[in-house]
Image (spheres, rainbow, N blue to C red):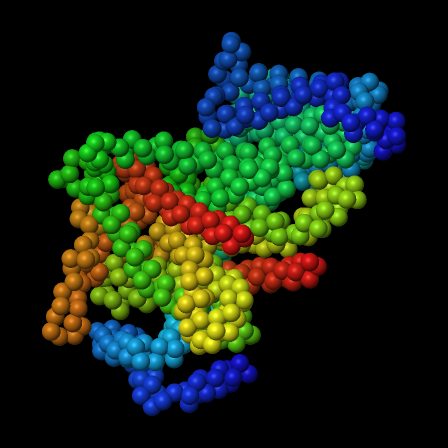
């Protein structure tokens, strides 16, 4: 439906133009398409259609600015969607060979045998699951407690200083966390906990959890802040203490926003690459026994990061890494959709009551 | 609530009666034990170190026992009505559940580890203990229900340490785990858990139990959490500064300002090895990504917000961009490695790095620009349209200027994020991480008479970047220049944090201006 109306809108705006503008529009559209095709087929030729496009765009800008602006923003939209679409499609296409070879075994076996060209993702998925669970156990309770502190308990002056500081800390690059984990925490764990090897799932989970903390705090605080004041005032007017109000009104009202924040944190933990790569030894074996969180294994992200260099000459291994990327992409996309749905529902229910 | 009428009024008037100050004793002891626990974790003190002739472990256990005695005292004085307060008839389900969980863990560990029984024995034993504790706690009035179980934990912890059952020389290797837990860890864990429980119970008692006591207890506990959280995050930053400052200031002088670490390359001809090429590389990466992504994303945002019909299409685009924003950065790296690299020179280049970071920036700038455009009030658009100007003139002269701060903030925050990214550029940018020369992009433009008419060797050559250099330090293996890495980490942190600081400050400034 929307596709048809878009086509109609384009044709309508096209018929409104005079002839030179129509020609310019067509030339611009074709030259851009040609440039894209040239980049995929033969990158050296990109310059010719690109030049044509630039000239057409300049002509349009100076003689038909309103139409040109509309067309250019439309082109920007299409290019953005095409780029993001290419990334998505390419990811899936490149994973096809390994799915054809391994079938369902890709998701159910643990073997990662480069010489036999047999690749199963279970080991990596297990590493990702364990580190994500540990990271969530660290970041969710502490993050929500921090959000309650900033939003409900702290005086205004403290809140105005702490909130930006927390957001600032969300910007610390993951490689810095990874460096600290590699240099300091790994040797600390070997020293104090007598770990047999350098690096463990526990350390990765802990580091990623701390890394995701500021995000969880900041987003849950936004959710608590969005609870309309009249709701809290009503509770206080009934004689409830502030804590009873927080516990029984603010947190239950904001619970969907808070869960969206936790899901966002989980997504960050799932996709965190550098910390896992540099802290773990990236051995493609499951820990023995499975629940040994102080053991050493590999995660989906660190598998890609540590192996895509050596996989360049082996199409099947590269395909297996793409399959790992697909798994990550699908899970993270699902989490993102869930958290957006929750957030939209919260906005609707809170908006209706004001 | 039964004695609310008898004592309630007085409590509303006075914050706390004199006798309630007894609760300050465990409160202070708890706070001290919390700090002591962290000090052991961070190895500022060892548990065997002596303080005034007494072993640190003994001091901590004495704190446990004292806090336990004080809590029992508060509970007994309260239940015998010596202290004037208004406890409820029971402590409530949540604390009872927490006490039950503690009992489960304690009994389960003793039965399975000390007595050596299997899961068929320790699990039921733990469950029975948890049920007994929870029911018993629910049966007694709130003042005892708050103080006695916490005191019991403190006594058990203190006695275990002081009698040497879990002393400094204790060690435990649980079956199936690679880790060994030693006395130091256990003592620190006891100190921290015990101190949180004690602080909660003491704060609760300080305000005379009941609803006000519970509020004070919960607020104190959460505040301690929050302060600890902030302290840990602040320590992280301080730790990087402390370790990296020496390296950054190596050979530096104030006047004339000269900091060789950030102005030198890496090589034999420099007296102090520096990271100048990596800084320049990072700057060009960011510039390239911004030049590529910002026009596209802002243009798309204008179209989607101002021209396109709001409906299923825009919602799908929104969902897709949000999803791509949270896609792991390594996936972008994998894409760039397999798709872009063979098409651009077939080796690592600065241009590929710029493009892949631009791809990452695209969704974020699109999302924030759309938000900024949507936040421009419709009155602006209507007022402009009422003057009889066209839609494009409205957008150009009214909507876009009003949205600039929001767009700018999004770009700055996005740049802060991509400047610190390592995963996407792992295999598409760098050939020589510790390079001696910075890429000179501006000086490398050459015009030719054949296609493609303009060439730039610097863009098509490998470069290096700050986060990659840090990664290279880690992977250098034995003899890695760790000091050099700390210096790089500090500079990287400063660069990224200052982007964030500018972004967050502008956002706060413009939000405030908007509200006026």
x and y percentages locating residue B379 in the rendered image = 54, 67
Looking at the image, the residue that sits furthest to the front is: B387
Horizontally, is A228 left or right of A335 in the view? right
State the quadrant of the N terminus of chain B: top right
A289, B159: nearer the viewer = B159
| Closer-to-camera residue (A96/B77) | B77
B95 or A109: nearer the viewer: B95
- Position of residue B279 relative to residue A347, above or below, is above
Q: Residue at x 60, y 40 (%)?
A: A149
Please indicate, yes or no, whether residue B513 appears anywhere in the rendered image. yes
Snapshot quadrant of residue B98: top right
> Residue at point 39% right, 38% down?
A180
Viewed as shown, does residue B459 lie left or right of A132?
Answer: left
The total of numbered circles placed on residues is 0
x 33%, y 60%: residue: B289
Q: Is residue B325 above or below residue B160?
A: below
Residue depicted at x 78% and y 37% = B92
Q: Where does the image place residue A186, in percent across and percent down from the top left?
A: 42, 37
Task: Find residue A114 and report its horizontal and vertical position in percent.
Answer: 36, 59
- Indicate whether B156 appears above or below B52: below
Q: Is residue A78 visible?
A: no
> Is the residue B331 above or below the residue B6 in the image?
below
Q: Residue A75: horizontal and vertical position, in percent?
A: 38, 75
């Amino acid at each position: 439906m929307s596709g048809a109306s878009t086509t109609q809108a384009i044709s309508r705006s096209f018929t409104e133009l005079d002839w030179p503008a129509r020609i310019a529009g067509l030339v611009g559209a074709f030259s851009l398409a040609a440039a894209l095709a040239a980049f995929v087929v033969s990158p050296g030729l990109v310059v010719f259609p690109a030049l044509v496009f630039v000239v057409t765009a300049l002509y349009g800008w100076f003689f038909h600015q309103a139409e040109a602006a509309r067309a250019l923003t439309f082109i920007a939209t299409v290019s953005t969607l095409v780029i993001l679409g290419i990334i998505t499609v390419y990811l899936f296409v490149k994973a096809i060979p390994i799915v054809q070879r391994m079938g369902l075994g890709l998701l159910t076996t643990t073997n990662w045998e480069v010489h036999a060209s047999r690749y199963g993702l279970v080991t990596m998925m297990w590493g990702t699951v364990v580190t994500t669970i540990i990271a969530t156990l660290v970041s969710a309770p502490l993050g929500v407690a921090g959000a309650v502190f900033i939003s409900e308990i702290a005086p205004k002056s403290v809140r105005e200083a702490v909130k930006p500081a927390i957001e600032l800390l969300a910007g610390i690059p993951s490689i810095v966390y990874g460096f600290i984990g590699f240099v300091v925490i790994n040797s600390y764990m070997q020293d104090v906990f007598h770990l047999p090897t350098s690096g463990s799932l526990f350390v990765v989970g802990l580091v990623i959890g701390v890394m995701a903390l500021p995000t969880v705090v900041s987003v849950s605080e936004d959710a608590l802040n969005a609870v309309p004041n009249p709701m809290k005032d009503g509770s206080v007017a009934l004689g409830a203490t502030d804590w009873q109000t927080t516990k029984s009104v603010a947190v239950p009202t904001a619970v969907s926003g808070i869960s969206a924040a936790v899901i966002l944190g989980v997504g960050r933990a799932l996709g965190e690459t550098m910390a896992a790569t540099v802290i773990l030894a990236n051995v493609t074996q499951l820990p023995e026994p499975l629940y040994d969180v102080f053991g050493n294994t590999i995660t989906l992200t660190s598998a890609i990061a540590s192996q895509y260099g050596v996989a360049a000459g082996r199409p099947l291994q590269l395909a297996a890494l793409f399959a790992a990327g697909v798994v990550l992409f699908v899970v993270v996309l699902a989490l993102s959709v869930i958290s957006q749905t929750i957030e939209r529902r919260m906005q609707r229910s809170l908006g209706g009551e004001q | 609530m039964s004695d609310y009428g008898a004592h309630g009024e007085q409590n509303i008037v006075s914050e706390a009666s004199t006798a309630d100050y007894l609760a300050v004793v465990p409160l202070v002891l708890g706070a001290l034990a919390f700090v002591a626990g962290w000090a052991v974790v961070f190895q500022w003190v060892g548990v065997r170190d002596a303080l005034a002739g007494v072993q640190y472990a003994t001091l901590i256990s004495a704190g446990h026992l004292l806090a336990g005695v004080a809590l029992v005292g508060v509970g007994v004085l309260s239940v015998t009505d010596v202290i004037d307060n208004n406890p409820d008839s029971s402590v409530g389900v949540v604390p009872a559940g927490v006490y039950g969980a503690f009992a489960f863990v304690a009994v389960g560990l003793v039965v399975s580890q000390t007595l050596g029984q299997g899961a068929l024995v320790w699990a039921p034993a733990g469950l029975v203990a948890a049920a007994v504790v929870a029911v018993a706690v629910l049966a007694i009035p709130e003042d005892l229900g708050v103080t006695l179980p916490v005191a019991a934990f403190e006594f058990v912890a203190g006695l275990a340490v002081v009698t040497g059952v879990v002393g400094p020389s204790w060690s435990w290797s649980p079956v199936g785990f690679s880790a060994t837990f030693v006395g130091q860890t256990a003592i620190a864990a006891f100190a921290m858990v015990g101190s949180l429980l004690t602080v909660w119970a003491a704060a609760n008692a300080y305000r005379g139990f009941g609803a006000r006591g519970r509020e004070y207890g919960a607020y104190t506990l959460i505040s301690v959490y929050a302060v600890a959280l902030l302290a840990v995050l602040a320590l992280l930053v301080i730790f990087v500064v402390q370790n990296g400052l020496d390296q950054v200031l190596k050979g530096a002088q104030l006047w004339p300002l000269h900091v060789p670490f950030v102005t030198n390359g890496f090589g034999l001809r420099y007296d102090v090895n520096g990271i100048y090429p990596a800084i320049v590389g990072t700057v060009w990466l960011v510039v390239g990504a911004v030049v590529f992504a910002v026009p596209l994303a802002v243009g798309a945002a204008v179209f989607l917000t101002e021209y396109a019909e709001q409906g299923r299409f825009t919602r799908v685009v929104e969902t897709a961009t949000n999803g791509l924003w949270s896609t792991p950065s390594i996936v972008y790296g994998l894409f760039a490695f397999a798709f872009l690299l063979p098409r651009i020179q077939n080796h690592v280049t600065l241009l590929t790095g710029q493009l892949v970071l631009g791809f990452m920036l695209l969704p974020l700038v699109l999302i924030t620009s759309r938000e900024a455009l949507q936040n421009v009030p419709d009155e602006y658009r209507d007022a402009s349209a009422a003057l009889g100007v066209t839609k494009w003139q409205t957008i150009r002269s009214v909507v876009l200027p009003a949205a600039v701060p929001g767009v700018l903030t999004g770009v700055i925050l996005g740049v802060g994020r991509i400047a610190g990214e390592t995963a996407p550029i792992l295999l598409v940018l760098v050939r020589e991480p510790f390079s001696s020369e910075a890429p000179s992009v501006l000086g490398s433009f050459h015009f030719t008479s054949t296609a493609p008419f303009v060439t730039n060797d610097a863009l098509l050559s490998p470069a290096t970047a700050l986060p990659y250099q840090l990664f290279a330090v880690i992977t250098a293996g034995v003899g890695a220049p760790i000091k050099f890495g700390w210096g790089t980490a500090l500079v990287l942190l400063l660069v990224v944090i200052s982007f964030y600081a500018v972004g967050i400050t502008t956002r706060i400034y413009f939000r405030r201006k908007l509200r006026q």
